[in-house]
Amino acid sequence: MSKAAKISTRIAKLKIPAKETSTPVIRPIGVFDSGIGGLTVTAALRSLLPAENIFYLGDTARVPYGGKSQQTIERYSTEITGLLLAEQAKIIVVACNTASALAIPRLEEILKVPVIGVIAPGAKAAVEATRKGHIGVIGTRATIYSGAYERAIQAINPEVRVTSQACPMLVPLIEEGWLEDRITDQVIRRYLGKLVRSGIDTLVLGCTHYPLLSEALKKFVGPDIQLVDSAHNCALAVKRLLIREKLAAPSKNLGKLQVALTDPSSAFLRVAEEALGLQVGDVQLRAVQNSVPLI
């Protein structure tokens, strides 16, 4: 049996241990991304759902996911999900467009808790925002080559035209904290020039890292192109899911945020605090290998 198959089997058998002090609704929302990008989703969740506990896990040891194969992304996602289930996560939020595009079907097969990604909410918001019916999408190579946004957008409105552009260098620049830098501006110009000239009126930031560059992106594309950030729309979808599944925390609960990484990152804390206004506190470390206990 392959390593990926063994992990999936162990995930499927994983039962969340009950604690007398932890009712289902008080258990945390589990959020993961390949690095710091998913913090944009976390910030939106904190703003919209202040009563909810959130456990965020950034797979900084293996960032970025965007250039990896589907098999590898599925394996990484199941391993990280195992760590979140060990924290008693009541739902899993895949705050990574690459993993949302390539791993959610597998996660839905093997998990006993609800799973939600960022692509469907982002696609819905883009269709609602477009005026001319021409939407641009930027993302990692894996996200763009998967065609996930095109399918999601055209499932809502088949008449909408979608033009996509992979931007693989943006995630490393963001992970370095180069949010306001001449080199970053040059990379944006190189990637988005043709896309802007194609006549799009709406631009989907198809990577949860990209909202951290929203000011630089707005400066380049101009006021006539509306940016769609799936983070807020994902948070709205999570709220609806919690209500539907009767998993919402009581409004009187004071939610807390816990953050863990798979490898230390000083840039992580700086970006979280300066760009997003998140008070992260002590960052925990989690080992990825053998992360899913066999029960």
Image (cartoon, grey):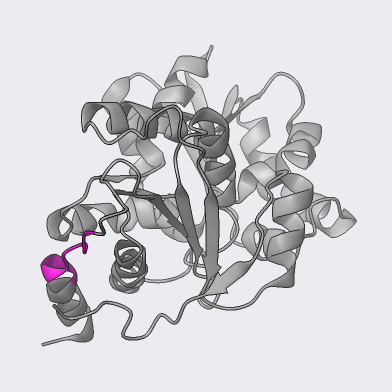
Direction from residue 282 to residue 19 in the image, left or right: left
Farthest residue in the top direction? 131
Q: Position of residue 52 (x, y in %)?
A: 44, 39
Residue furthest right in the image: 182
Image coordinates of residue 51 in percent, x first then y, are 47, 34
| Quadrant into which the N terminus falls | bottom left
Is residue 33 shown to the viewer in this render? yes
Can residue 173 be seen here? The reply is no
Q: Is residue 202 above or below residue 173?
A: above
- Asked if the stretch drawn in magenta spans residue 16, the answer is yes
- Residue 14 lies in what quarter of the image? bottom left
* Residue shown at the point (57%, 78%) measured from the top left: 263
> Which residue is rendered at x = 61% and y = 25% of the image?
199
Magenta span of residues: 11-18
Nearer to me, 48 or 207: 48
Horizontal side of residue 4 vs 65, given as left or right:
left
Magenta segment, principal secondary structure? loop
Kindly identify the residue that appears in the image at 28 percent across and 68 percent down. 78
Q: Is residue 66 above or below residue 233?
A: below
